[in-house]
Image: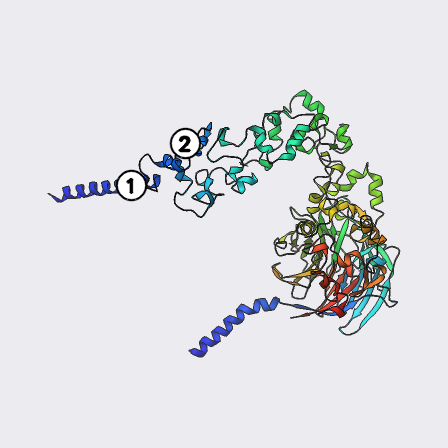
Amino acid sequence: MNARKAIVISVVAAALLGLSVLAASAAQDKNPFKLKPGAKGKLCLQCHPNFEEKLKSRFLHTPVKEGDCSSCHSPHASSHGSLLAADPDKICLECHDGIVEKNAVSTHKVVLEGACIKCHDPHGAPNKNNLLASGNELCFGCHKDMKKTTEAAKVKHEPVSEGCLTCHNPHASTSAEFLLNEKVPGLCLECHDSKAKIFGQIHMHYPVEKGRCTSCHDPHGGNAKGILYATAHQPVVNRMCNQCHEPADSANPLATRRQGFELCRACHSTMVNEMFTKNQVHGPVLDQKGCLNCHSPHASRQSALLKAQPLNVCGKCHGDTIERQETAKTKHPPIQAGECTACHSPHASDNPFYFKEKSQFDLCGQCHEWQSHSTHPIGDEVKDPRNQNRTVMCTSCHRVHGNGNEHMFHYAPAGQMCVQCHTKFRR
Amino acid sequence: MRRYKFTMVVVLSLLTVLPSWAGAVTLRHVLSVYADEKDVGLNQPMGIACSDEARFAVADTGNKRVLLFKFDGSALSLLQNIKLGELPDPVKVAFDRKGGLVVFDAKARRLAQVSAEGKFVRYIEPTGMPDDKTIIPKSFSLDPEGRIYLLDIFGARVLVLDAEGKFLRQVRFPENYEFISDILVTPKGAILAADSAASELYKASPEENQLKVLNSDLEKSQVRFPVAIGLDERNFIYLLDKHSGSVAVLGPDGSLQEHKLAEGWTEGALWYPAGICVNDYGRAFISDTDNNRVQVFEMVR
């Protein structure tokens, strides 16, 4: 055998050996538990006979269909429930890792949590994609308020009836917030022709197609004509856009005639003038955005045209105060109910903390009838021993926005609170 | 060789410890001011200013007056009790170069000049503005040359005016600001601004025309609602956190060094404070608003 022949034979042998190793490795990947041929799912069914029923589902998860139980379950032992081969909130991603694109703008909370089984049956289901329910019913399982809203709406939005997925992506969106398939107004304009004559007439020929349709219209339906939100600003209802905006045929028709509170003052002069008689005007009222910091100029689901629920509106700046309530042991009902304005005047006040009443007694007394009972000495005549310039008030003992203590006491246990002033009882 | 090694270890240890030590400061309570000479108690004091002559002025807002004190480290004396009809709601004060005061009144929404004798001189109206936008001041600061830096929340800008009120230039608010409550101009002319809602600190160098974020991590650092800024001679920044009743001490670069003080009612503690200033004698003055007093602290390093 000459040297050349020997080299060729060696190379071929090495290649064959390599291929066989690769093939063996691939086979092991496919059958990591070295199950006997034909065993797979059938073997599992010997002990899990009830699963036969599941296998009759109209739609089956591919590994189930292939009897490949061990692709999700470890047959011997596992650190996870149901002998899952990986963390329950990550196991699906081992095959479906592209379900949320890296540049997603919004992602469904359940997807982020890895709670795929809230929507999908991992084995099989009567619905496509192994969904637990069909159509909107699946979404309404969690979004119960939305079910009520859409069912109660007198004026329906057709795409809602067609299905939530007409506008929303169930997993994530790379385009827009709220899992929308496209940003607003682009999404709306897919169905609504802004060039149509009627569209221009209804919108007083303002180029609203450049704005946010959802600042006026409730995409899930409503009771008002044109599915405007429940609370609509009167100029919007009356289609008097030019009361606030530049004329429709001007160079910049969506621009407002004035900025901040000066725009609103034109109609709400009494309110604004009264505000300015107070010592302290709430800062946001006077900044560039002015009233629009808290109110929507067109329409809103909330009363008083608030941009969102009061806790969210106030919490945008006073998040730490709202958070205090969220973690509090004892909740103060007005805050719990989002009624910040039960105690605070949101626009202006002569009193500290924009309180509605000068006296804390009058303020707290609106709900707490402590005056009719015997009580700890309290009032303008009772000096706080800790500070000669303070009198004993409700807030001397209670943190009204809550804290980690029962009854919103500043200290715990309660005795600790008392000895702050009654020092001779300190231990 | 052994001695050399030992020296190196000592030097390196000092290099490690010194930077943190250099920033460390203890605020030791030395005085609380509760009332004027007639024992009229302070009521919701807001802004406070310090001067080089150991004087300090406080806007005693609830009593609609400004009180001028001197504290030399041992004795406190009331110099003036200024109550003027032109100032129905004084909330912020600063010493001018003539020994008088500039006062911002929240109800009048104007700056007023008050003479060294405590008399009203005039309202300082911005003139020569490049536009006719409405101006709504929220706070102000004076630089060593007497220029006025006016925080205009309606125009989303800081107006730089000369001592007479003539427009010199303007500095825009940063992108994505939320609500700026206070500004302070440093001796070198940089502007610091505290965003209460975003819990951020902004800065603009003298040549810049827009504020930029200096520290955006304040919220993570438990600074909840910064409302006032003080500055010491080392350019360390003292950010008064109204909602936690504490002071965040930041380095000149805006990095958080430490938190000082805590909320409470006893002396040394704060309850919803609103103003802070630091004087050349190493004392910090805090208007402890809801405790209705001013507290003075020695800054011990």
From the viewer's side, name the closer residue of B198 and A249: B198
From the viewer's side, name the closer residue of B21 and A62: A62
Q: Answer left or right for B30 relative to A49.
A: right
Q: Percent from the top left, x then y, of residue A100? A: 50, 38
Precedes in sequence: disc 2 or disc 1 = 1
* Residue that badge 2 annotates: A65
In this rendering, the label closer to the viewer, 2 or 1: 2
- The residue sitting at the left extreme is A1
Residue that appears at 71% across and 39% down? A307
Q: Do labels 2 and 1 share a chain?
A: yes
Q: Answer left or right for B298 relative to A16.
A: right
In the rendered image, which quarter is residue A200 located in? top right
For disc 1, the chain is A
* Residue that badge 1 annotates: A24
Q: Percent from the top left, x then y, of residue B88? A: 86, 54
Residue that appears at 85% across and 53% down? A371
Q: Percent from the top left, x then y, of residue A332? A: 73, 49
Is disc 2 placed on a helix, strand or loop? helix
Q: What residue type is labelled 2?
A: Lys
Q: Percent from the top left, x then y, of residue B266? A: 75, 65
From the viewer's side, name the closer residue of A34 and B130: A34
- The residue sitting at the top extreme is A197
Question: Distance from label 2 to label 1 (Cα)?
Answer: 25 Å
Is residue A17 visible in this depiction of the protein? yes
Is disc 1 placed on a helix, strand or loop? helix
How was the colour assigned to the protein in this rendering?
rainbow
Q: How many labels does the image show?
A: 2
Q: On screen, B241 above or below B155?
A: below
Q: Which amino acid does label 1 sit on?
A: Ala
In the rendered image, which quarter is residue A244 located in? top right
Is residue B148 visible in this depiction of the protein? no
In the rendered image, which quarter is residue B117 located in? bottom right
